[in-house]
Image (cartoon, coloured by chain):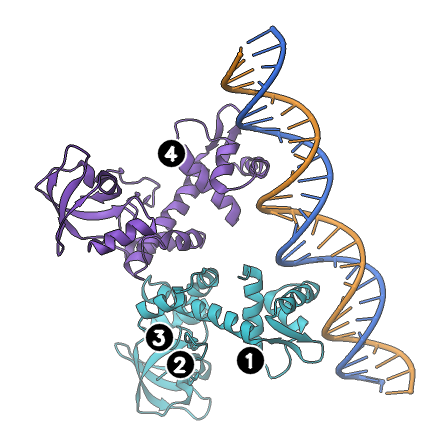
Chain colours: A purple, B cyan, C blue, D orange
Amino acid sequence: MQSFSEENYLKTIYHLGLKGSDKVSPTAIAEALKNNPASVVDMLKKLSDKKLINYDKKKGARLTEKGIKAAADIVRKHRLWEVFLLQKLDYGWDEIHDIAEQMEHVHHKELADRLDKFLGYPDFDPHGDPIPKANGKMAQTFKTTLFEVEAGKKYRVLAVKDTSPEFLQYLQKLGITIGSKLKVLEKIAFDGSMVIQAAKGDKVNVSRKFGESVLVG
Amino acid sequence: MQSFSEENYLKTIYHLGLKGSDKVSPTAIAEALKNNPASVVDMLKKLSDKKLINYDKKKGARLTEKGIKAAADIVRKHRLWEVFLLQKLDYGWDEIHDIAEQMEHVHHKELADRLDKFLGYPDFDPHGDPIPKANGKMAQTFKTTLFEVEAGKKYRVLAVKDTSPEFLQYLQKLGITIGSKLKVLEKIAFDGSMVIQAAKGDKVNVSRKFGESVLVG
DNA sequence: AATAAAAATTAGTCTTGCCTAATAAAATAT
DNA sequence: ATATTTTATTAGGCAAGACTAATTTTTATT
């Protein structure tokens, strides 16, 4: 069993490993965790001893099979709890992350599976990130942004990429929430903006930035 | 904000304060937490400094207003999560305590209230213990054990007092679970045992110990 | 290749929360 | 009232996980 701190490192290495194409270095980890690089080196040593990572100055930190399993489990729980908090407790998009950050560390062998079942086996969390399955695999992150879709069609809002209060308040003002239906009326080639209409809203023109922040399907 | 450890001390002092008639002493706390008394003394000093308790060798540890609020909040979350785990995730009576022990430390100002609402404002947890309300008050713990009831009447199982695997397996074997209806057919004065019949079960004679472990209403 | 800049590492410290051992204080028994 | 036992407290240590400062190694620049 890992400590909270160890789990946070594993999670960070997992994310950095998937994201960046370059190696997962102590400085990168330190930056992500807002820790000191010296502390990171200590921890990398510890995680190496526990066979959760392989660390090599050249290649950076790499999760072992065991480490991947542990990290994916934490990410899985994090994202499942986010779904729970949003769907069941009616929390806002901007609040769920910090709470899930705590809940992901709750341990019990069947917890993730039971929660998954209770929530109806969701594939994505409310931020559009795929939820790892029990086997560690995850749905291909096939997110389409509103910006990419064709004019004239209807879509459903699946998630959002931006969780700033400003954006969320704007969405609220437009009557858009997760699950809302949107119709794309027109795409303006000039600046990437588009005219859309929410189920029970007026026609509005939204910016390219807006379009890129809304995930639909 | 308190650390996990501080929260566990507060919770323990809260419970010991309600239960026992005598003072909450370092040894009593140490025993409950399976800690060394010396460690307890350290922590009592710390909690005193934080104005969460008053400690006096004569009177023992007493929660301040602030301490009561903090402790009740933890207990509230613990018991609400127990209800969640049992009702929503279908965990067994014997498993929920340890998980709730972890979940009670998740912080967010509205969390308890939202969870409470989601669960339909339950008054008792699955072990029959009253759930503190948002204001810190709790329903009078008016638990009737099966042992105390009259013969000839029907009751509903509200909770259980004993959570040993042996007892829970026995219940399962008898087809009894939370919410089950029971009919008390006969009470045997000789040894306090009684003949009962579960909704879809046969007549069985159960011991006094059994009767005292089942809470009904 | 020499030098400057950035990254990694080591050494030493701090805080939290626990421990053991030793001592002081209080309660209980004789 | 004194001796014994129990309880509380102090002192000193330890491990985890963070930090700063100093040093070494690596990478980039000229």
Q: Is residue A2 visible?
A: no
Of residue B20 and residue A66, the one placed in the foreground of this image is: B20
- Secondary element at image label 4: helix
- Does label 2 or label 3 sit earlier along the sequence? 3
Dividing the picture into quadrants, the one containing residue B64 is: bottom right
Marked residue chain, label 3: B
Name the disc covering residue A88, or none: none
Cα separation, mark 1 vs mark 2, equals 19 Å
Q: Which residue has dot 3 on it? A: B122
Q: Residue flagged by tag 1: what amino acid is it?
A: Lys
Horizontal side of A217 relative to B66 (left or right) equals left
Name the disc covering residue A18, or none: 4
- Secondary element at image label 2: strand
Cα separation, mark 1 vs mark 4, equals 52 Å
- Secondary element at image label 3: loop
Of residue B31 and residue A29, the one placed in the foreground of this image is: A29
Residue at image position (56%, 69%) is: B10
Marked residue chain, label 2: B
* Image x and y of residue A81, in percent: 35, 54
Q: Quadrant of the C terminus of chain A?
A: top left
Q: Which residue has dot 1 on it? A: B19
Cα separation, mark 4 vs mark 3, equals 43 Å
- Does label 1 or label 3 sit earlier along the sequence? 1
Binning the other alpha carbons within 10 Å of mark 4 as few (below 14), some (14 to 19) or many (20 upward) gives few
Cα separation, mark 1 vs mark 3, equals 22 Å
Residue at image position (38%, 55%) is: A111
Of residue B162 and residue A171, the one placed in the foreground of this image is: A171
Q: Nearer the viewer, mark 1 or mark 3?
A: 3
Do dots 1 and 3 share one subunit?
Answer: yes
Q: Residue flagged by tag 3: what amino acid is it?
A: Pro
Q: Which residue has dot 2 on it? A: B215
